[in-house]
Image (tube, helix red, strand yellow):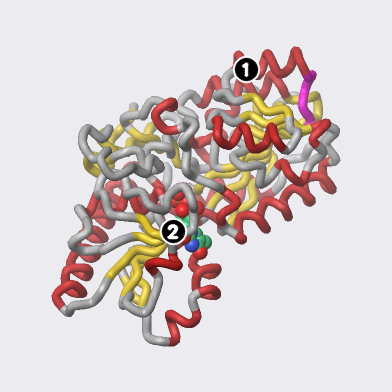
């Protein structure tokens, strides 16, 4: 049975940055989270139609961050060395940040957002500009045979029907093939109070426990889990066919399952406590911003991440509290944040001496940003975050 535990109010499509003149009739939906006490899966109560989110104007450009470029470059080399795949398929290849490290003649991309699919096609990778389904997996198997490595980053948690997703993977895996995927981690979200991991695209926030339950019923088994720092705490899950005796199950699997149980992820009460913490976070953030306003401080936001869409819409933060948002992504600059309609401008235009406090929207890149913004910090500029609780630094 699915039980609701969190209500983040009416929310827009988090990555659909809008133009002046498009403010009316914006699509909004009820952002609520539920816990399934059978599988232990945390999901959105209401899913948004994939075509509304993932299309030719999708804005999230993975290569905008040096941290992510290093992350995927390092991983691609490690997977090649450790598992020596003869061929590779990536589900949700975005701008090619991961597959660019593999040979185009033995690597396939699947990417429903046409603007990004065109980029990997131009890089000579066979790219299917389609959503990942068991039908597509059958077609790819017919055309290219089975795959030794199937990889996906920040993509599987976007897909509503996980049974179909995993059936599709199982169908395409070679006998000793592996499926590796990484997505934000539920335990990290709960520990950090980072409720902003919840937005339209994140149909689910995965625990290892829930994944194990759903993978198992699709003849797949987790054999290793890496805990990662990226995206505010993610898990990289390594999966094999249940019939594959070649890969041994690593201790990291049992370790993560018991940590999740100890934390209380299998107990609905934990989710109710999380909801109370989120309400308190909202009160604290709004009162701090109001106080700064009264003191005459200029407050902006740094990074127009999807996560900021959740926070500002949930907390009712608009231009009167945060003047604008700076972001390095060319396709976001000159547009407006979904829902709140706060303008987005380039850091060159907006991150200057006039700023007193910057809400750190891209809090998951805190180290990268702190290293970059030493001038701002040394002249007394401050950042504000809500993770793990509302604070300035
Ligand atoms: P990110 O946290 O990657 O994604 P999500 O949309 O999944 O929440 O988004 C970070 C945003 O911050 C992205 O639009 C790029 C921007 N950004 C900057 O403007 N400056 C920076 O130095 C960094 C690291 C990111």
Q: How many marks?
A: 2
Residue 40, x across and y down, in percent = 43, 35
Residue tagged 2: 327
Residue 262 shows in the view: no
Image quarter of the C terminus = bottom left
Q: Secondary structure at mark 1?
A: helix
Residue 216, x across and y down, in percent = 60, 27
Report the mark closest to the observer, 2 or 1: 2
Compared to residue 260, the image places residue 163 above or below, namely above
Residue drawn at 58 percent across, 29 percent down: 215
Residue 259, x across and y down, in percent = 52, 52
For the residue pair 144 and 261, the one nearer the viewer reads as 144
Residue 103, x across and y down, in percent = 82, 38
Disc 2 under 8 Å from ligand 1? The reply is: yes
Residue 335 shows in the view: yes
Residue drawn at 26 percent across, 73 percent down: 298
Residue tagged 1: 136
In this picture, which residue range is highlighted in magenta? 144-148
């Amino acid at each position: 049975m699915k039980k609701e535990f969190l209500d983040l109010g009416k929310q827009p499509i988090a990555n659909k940055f809008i133009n002046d003149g498009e403010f009316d009739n914006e699509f909004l939906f009820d952002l609520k989270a539920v816990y399934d006490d059978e599988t232990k899966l945390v999901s959105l109560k209401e899913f948004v139609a994939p075509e509304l989110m993932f299309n030719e104007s999708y804005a999230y450009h993975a290569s905008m961050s040096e941290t992510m470029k290093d992350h995927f470059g390092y991983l691609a080399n490690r997977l090649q060395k450790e598992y020596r795949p003869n061929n590779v398929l990536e589900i949700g290849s975005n701008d090619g940040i991961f597959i660019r490290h593999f040979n185009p003649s033995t690597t396939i991309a699947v990417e429903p957002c046409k603007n990004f699919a065109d980029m990997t096609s131009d890089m000579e990778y066979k790219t299917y500009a389609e959503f990942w389904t068991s039908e597509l997996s059958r077609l790819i198997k017919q055309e290219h045979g089975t795959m030794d490595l199937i990889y996906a980053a920040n993509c599987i948690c976007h897909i509503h029907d996980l049974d179909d997703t995993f059936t599709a993977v199982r169908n395409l895996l070679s006998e000793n093939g592996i499926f590796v995927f990484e997505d934000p981690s539920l335990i990290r979200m709960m520990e950090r109070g980072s409720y902003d991991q919840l937005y339209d695209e994140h149909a689910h926030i995965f625990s290892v426990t829930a994944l194990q339950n759903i993978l198992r019923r699709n003849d797949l088994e987790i054999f290793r889990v890496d805990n990662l720092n990226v995206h505010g705490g993610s898990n990289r899950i390594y999966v094999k066919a249940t019939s594959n005796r070649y890969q041994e199950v690593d201790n990291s699997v049992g370790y993560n399952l018991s940590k999740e149980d100890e934390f209380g992820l299998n107990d609905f009460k934990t989710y109710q406590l999380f909801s109370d913490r989120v309400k308190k976070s909202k009160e604290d953030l709004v009162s701090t911003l109001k106080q700064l306003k009264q003191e005459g401080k200029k407050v902006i936001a740094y990074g127009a991440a999807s996560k900021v869409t959740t926070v500002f819409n949930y907390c009712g933060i608009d231009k009167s509290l945060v003047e604008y948002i700076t972001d390095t992504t060319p396709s976001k600059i000159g547009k407006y944040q979904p829902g709140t309609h706060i303008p987005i401008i380039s850091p060159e235009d907006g991150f200057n001496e006039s700023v007193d406090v910057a809400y750190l929207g891209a809090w998951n890149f805190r180290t990268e940003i702190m290293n970059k913004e030493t001038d701002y910090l040394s002249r007394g500029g401050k950042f504000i975050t809500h993770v793990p609780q509302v604070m300035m630094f």
